[in-house]
Image: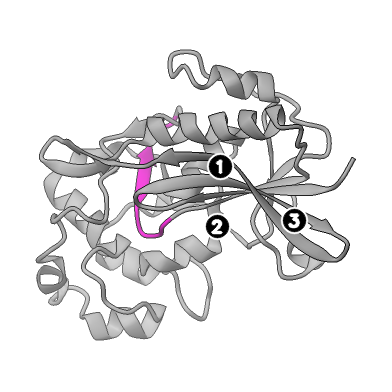
């Protein structure tokens, strides 16, 4: 059977599942599934339809399977900065507010006496955008401090989708770096920034390098997850199939 790889590319308005193969030394790409992504208004904010995204990711995996593909790896790519908070059971807390929402408009000015942007930039190297995760978290802390108090885990959107496929919570470095909470030199969560802003350090898990492999649930159990009321139980996963980020070198690929 020909080796193939599956990329799940999700943008702000649509997503697609692309199978990649190498044929006679030439890379070939085959779209096997496409779906719409949309914002919904909820509790006064613009939010992502996360359950819709999860269902479409799984439907795309089924479409690839039905088309005769057995991918060696699956990688998920989405936009950066947005996140979900989870409780001890892995259930989302609050709404997945989108970066297009206006809740962070004045946060830079409000934080300047606590954490000047010049210091934030010097430590993280992340340029100013009003929707940066650091501002989103502080806006959430201002509006719903009880949600941060109840949170046990912080996952960005692709990390959350990976979690729903695998049952493994992992913070991938590339996306984590866009939060403006990761040190440019340390390449880890910056405790000084987190403490200055009064954010709960416990929610930020170990950062994994690009190439980290996460085991997939068996496809028949994944299919059950289309029903939010009947999520899959942990399983042994497909033989030889993993969920992986792009790795630069073989040495960067580690198992969790």
Within-10-Å neighbours for mark 3: few <14, some 14–19, many 20+: some
Name which residue lies at 36% across and 33% down. 92
Asked whether residue 5 is drawn in magenta, I would say no
Where residue 205 appears, x then y in whole percent?
Answer: 50, 51
Name which residue lies at 25% across and 46% down. 97
Mark identifier at residue 162:
1
**Distance Cα–Cα, label 2 vs label 3:** 12 Å
- Left or right of residue 129, residue 18 in this image: right
The segment highlighted magenta reads 79-88
Secondary element at image label 1: helix
Q: Nearer the viewer's eye, disc 1 or disc 2? A: 1
Q: Which of 149 and 69 is in front in this view?
A: 69
Circles 2 and 3 in contact, beta carbons < 8 Å: no
**Circle 3 residue:** 254
Q: Residue furthest top?
A: 230
Counting residues from the N terminus, which is met first, the one under dot 2 or under dot 3?
2
Secondary element at image label 3: loop
Name the colour scheme: one colour
**Distance Cα–Cα, label 3 vs label 1:** 16 Å
**Distance Cα–Cα, label 1 vs label 2:** 10 Å
Secondary element at image label 2: strand
Counting residues from the N terminus, which is met first, the one under dot 1 or under dot 2?
1
**Circle 2 residue:** 172
Name which residue lies at 35% across and 52% down. 12
Where residue 20 appears, x then y in whole percent?
Answer: 71, 53
Counting residues from the N terminus, which is met first, the one under dot 3 or under dot 1?
1
Where residue 207 appears, x then y in whole percent?
Answer: 55, 58
Where residue 5 appears, x then y in whole percent?
Answer: 73, 49
């Amino acid at each position: 059977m020909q080796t193939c790889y599956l990329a799940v590319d999700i943008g702000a308005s649509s997503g697609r599942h692309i199978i990649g193969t190498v044929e006679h030394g030439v890379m070939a790409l085959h779209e096997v599934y496409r779906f719409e992504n949309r914002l919904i208004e909820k509790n006064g904010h613009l939010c992502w339809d996360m359950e819709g995204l999860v269902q479409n990711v799984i439907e795309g995996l089924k479409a690839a399977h039905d088309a005769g593909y057995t991918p060696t790896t699956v990688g998920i790519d989405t936009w950066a900065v947005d996140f979900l908070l989870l409780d001890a059971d892995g259930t989302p807390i609050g709404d997945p507010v989108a970066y297009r929402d206006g809740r962070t408009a004045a946060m830079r000015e409000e934080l300047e006496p606590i954490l000047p942007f010049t210091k934030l930039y010097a430590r993280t190297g992340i340029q100013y955008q009003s929707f940066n995760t650091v501002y989103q978290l502080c806006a959430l802390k201002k509006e719903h401090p009880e949600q941060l108090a109840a949170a046990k885990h912080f996952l960005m959107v692709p990390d959350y989708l990976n979690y729903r496929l695998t049952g493994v919570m992992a913070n991938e470095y590339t996306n984590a770096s866009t939060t403006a909470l990761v040190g440019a030199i340390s390449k880890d969560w910056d405790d000084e920034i987190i403490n200055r802003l009064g954010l709960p350090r416990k929610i930020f898990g170990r950062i994994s390098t690009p190439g980290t492999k996460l085991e997939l649930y068996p496809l028949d159990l994944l299919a059950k997850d289309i029903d939010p009321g009947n999520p899959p139980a942990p399983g042994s996963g497909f033989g030889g199939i993993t969920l992986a980020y792009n790795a630069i070198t073989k040495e960067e690929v580690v198992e969790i």
